[in-house]
Structures are given as C-alpha cells and as structure tokens.
Amino acid sequence: MNLEIPEGKQLFVIVAMMRSGSNLLQQKLNAIDGILCHGEIFNSSQSGLEPRFERTEPLLNTLKAIDRMETPIPYLNRLIELSKADHVGFRLFESHNNELIKPLIADSRIFKIILVRDFLTSYVSLQIAVQTDQWITNKPGTRKAWKPIQVNMDAFKNYALRHSLFYYEVLSNCMVAGQKCLTLEYSSLNSVETEQKLLDHFGRHRAINRSKITALRQNPEPLESKIENFEEVQTRLRKLRLDRWLLDNAEK
C-alpha cells in the first residue's frame, strides 16, 4: 500500500536521535497554528505511545485497530486522514521501524527537518535519562537527581557509528534527489533564527502560541561533570581525532 497524502495536507518528519532536543522541537512546531506533530509514533519499545489527539476523539479507535508496527503505511495513512492540521508530522529515529524508514526518506513529498547534536553529548544525556527514567522536564524544580555516568567507549563508538550512517543516508538522499530539508542544531533551537527558518517553510502568516513551549534543558552542567571517566574519554577521543566534541561542549 502506498502512502496517501490528501490534497491540502503536507507531511513532514523530524529526523533525529534520542536526546537531541526533539521534544522541544515538537513543542515548538505544535505551538504554530496549523501544524500537528505526533511524536515517536513508530517507537517499537514503547507500546503506550499515542498520537496527539484528544482522548475523546471518536475516530481514534479506528486508528488503534491498525497495527502501527506490522502495517505502518495504513496506520500512517489513517493518522494523516484524522489529523485536522494542514501540516502533519512525527519524529523518526534510527531505532524505529526499519521497513518504514527507507520509503519515508526516499519520498520527496515529505519535508525533512534534520535535527543534529554531537554524539558524545547526546550519548551522555541518554545514559542519564535511563538512570533517572526522566525523559522530559516541563516545570522548574522537577528535575531528578543524577550521578555521573561511566562511558563505555566501545558502546559509544557503536552508538556514534550507527547514528552517523543513519544521518548520512538521510542527508545523501536529500542531496541526490534534491529533496527539501531543513537542518537544525540542538544548541540553536531556542534562537530567533530557528523560529524564522521554520516559518519560512510553514508560512510566516501563522500565529505562534509560545505558552505551549515548556520543555526545559535537563542537564545544563558542563560535560566533564557528567562523565565519571572523563580523562579516559578525553584521551580516547584525541586518539580518534574526535576531541572537537569536547571543545564544542565547552561553549554550550
């Protein structure tokens, strides 16, 4: 079955990885009139994920009847149909439905927002989130206490390689096929420039309800305070000529 995008609607995906600021970006998009971003609807590890409809939505049961992992295209077609916004989107990570990722990346009708963050910072943030079981903070004073993490360099290298290949596939497809895409960096998400870039695509006439943007940075401390074996990590990264990440983070 082919992906069906009804006339008058446009589909977009946030191509990202965990702990790259995608929660904040989703909130920013949902604060713009006429945009509905559903989140990680194809995350196989979280069975409780639901699209962003009101729970009283009578047609929601017709969507729940479709297996989102076994038949992702029919699920997505129904999701787009039920979404009342003219721009409908969701978050797409490397770990999501493999059978779905390739056709979505290749589909030039889908606008790609590519969200990047350096791999070391995202990896450390991910380990802290697993440790605390806190994945988003929307209210001041609700952040859970955490302890510095021990970075396993072999696990980190696998993590960085896997996500490098994922981003490469997306970016190369966009370049070769001339697809429309917008690349954003984590540290610039709260900038006026990023807001303007989003409005350049979705329409400068759209109203923004900034009260809907509540996500707070969870781990603003310096990177060295979050890594127990920081000196080892520093040494290994220098040997790999990747210590630029450490320099970049000194300024964030």
Image (cartoon, helix red, strand yellow):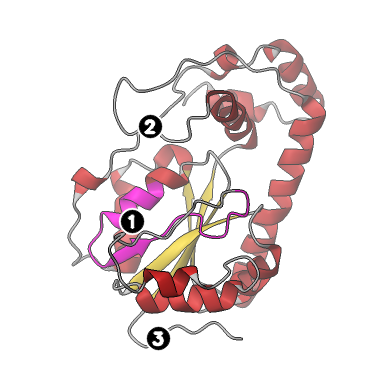
Q: Earlier in the sequence, mark 3 or mark 1?
A: 3
**Which amino acid type is marked by label 2?**
Thr
Q: Position of residue 72 (x, y in %)?
A: 59, 71
Left or right placement of residue 36 versus residue 173 in this view: left
Which numbered marker is on residue 137? Answer: 2
**Tag 2 and tag 1, C-beta contact below 8 Å:** no
Q: Quadrant of residue 31?
A: bottom left
Across the whole image, how many numbered discs are drawn on residues?
Answer: 3
Residue at image location 58% in from the left, 34% down from the top: 122
Residue at image location 73% in from the left, 53% down from the top: 165
Residue at image location 44% in from the left, 37% down from the top: 187
Q: Is residue 79 visible?
A: no
Spatial distance from mark 3 to mark 1, Cα to Cα?
Answer: 21 Å
Mark 3 surroundings within 10 Å by alpha-carbon count, few (fewer than 14), some (14 through 19), many (20 or more):
few
Residue with the mark numbered 3: 6
**Tag 2 and tag 3, C-beta contact below 8 Å:** no
Q: Position of residue 142 (x, y in %)?
A: 35, 23
